[in-house]
Image (tube, helix red, strand yellow):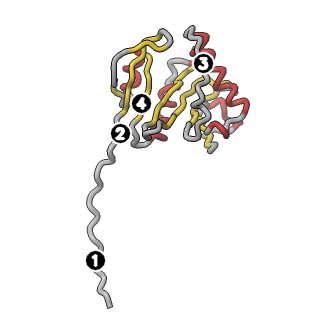
Amino acid sequence: MPDRSSSAASRSTCEVERSRFTDLTVDQLYGILQLRSDVFVVEQHCPYPELDGRDAEPDTVHLWITEHDATIAYARLLTEPDGTRRIGRVVTRTDRRGRGLAGRLLTAALDLAGDAEVVLSAQAHLTDFYARYGFEVAGDEYLEDGIPHRPMRRPRRTTPPTAATPPAAATPTV
């Protein structure tokens, strides 16, 4: 599925790119994993197995933003066995925070999720940020790798009913 909304020539425009695992190039995968490791393991002092096996699942969609060929923001969209979608690994490079990049990735992920229920594990200090995208706190605070988190969910959306279509005029049978 590579559906990259930016070409190699315009990577400095900070467009959201997306791909399934099997369609990622080696350079794209390296940039994504480097960013995730730099922030989640090094910056946040959480030595944990960052590679959890979910990146390669067939339904996982990777979303990222590059600038000057460097990955500066990333998120992934997973599908749980019950059909619920899960957004995870939302990350922005330290020197690029405050520019709305994570919000752009969330918007793209939610567009892909459509009307499905979407869940995520938010660092507790970011619950207001996620609430702006329709997420609600869905449980008690817990520690994950020493960092307070809250489960959040955006309920399944129900499509508003459409106006009833008037019945077609009866066609006489011969």
Q: Which residue is mark 2?
A: 156
Asked which secondary structure carries label 4, the reply is strand
Q: Which residue is mark 1?
A: 169
Q: Residues within 10 Å of mark 2 (few under 14, many from 20)?
A: some
Q: Of tags 2 and 3, which is closer to the observer?
A: 3
Q: Amino acid at mark 4?
A: Val
Query: Of 29 and 83, which appears nearest the observer?
Result: 83
State which tag comes first along the sequence, 4 or 1.
4
Q: Which residue is mark 3?
A: 49
Q: Amino acid at mark 3?
A: Pro
Kindly identify the residue that appears in the image at 26 percent across and 61 percent down: 164
In the displayed structure image, the side of residue 77 where residue 138 appears, left or right: left
In the displayed structure image, the side of residue 155 where residue 77 appears, left or right: right
State which tag comes first along the sequence, 2 or 4.
4
State which tag comes first along the sequence, 2 or 3.
3
Separation of residues labelled 2 and 3 (CA atoms): 31 Å
| Residue 169: quadrant of the picture | bottom left
Q: Amino acid at mark 1?
A: Ala
